[in-house]
Amino acid sequence: MGDCHFLEGNLRAKERVEYAKMLLEEVGLGEKRLEMYHMGASDAPVWVEKVVEFTERIRAMGPNPLKRNDLPPSGGNILGGRIPAEAGEEQ
């Protein structure tokens, strides 16, 4: 890594992905639900291979272990779909 033509962006991205993986592990989702791959723009066959590989990995892991089936139909919004007005906004 480090050979990105955008200087060191891929190195910063790698650090951020590692941090995000740590957070996923802490909340119980598992770090294997996130991955960073290094490949060039012309590596379409490699991209396809990695997409298939990652999709298979996620399917094997199953659904989100934190997903609750007892949430209301509002998509989990406990306010029933209503979002409170910001301070100073008219209601």
Image (tube, rainbow, N blue to C red):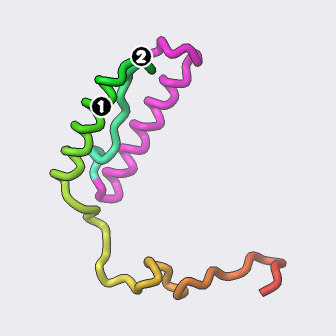
State the residue position of label 2. 1
Whole-percent x and y of residue 49? Answer: 25, 30
Whole-percent x and y of residue 90? Answer: 82, 84
Amino acid tagged 1: Val
Instruction: Tell me where the magenta segment starts and ends, as one range.
Output: 1-29
Furthest-left residue in view?
Answer: 60
Q: Reading the chain from its start, which is encountered first: label 2 or label 1?
A: 2
Query: Residue 40 appears in which quarter of the rendering?
Result: top left
Depth check, front residue: 84 or 56 = 56
The answer to whether 7 appears left or right of 84 in the picture is: left
Q: Distance between the residues labelled 2 and 1?
A: 20 Å
State the residue position of label 1. 48
- Image point (35%, 28%), residue name: 37
**What crowding class fits label 2: few (fewer than 14 Cα within 10 Å), some (14-19), or many (20 or more)?**
few
| 55 to 6, vertically: above or below | below
Residue 90 colored magenta? no
Task: Give the dominant element type of the magenta stretch: helix, strand or loop.
Answer: helix
**What crowding class fits label 1: few (fewer than 14 Cα within 10 Å), some (14-19), or many (20 or more)?**
few
- Image point (47%, 36%), residue name: 16
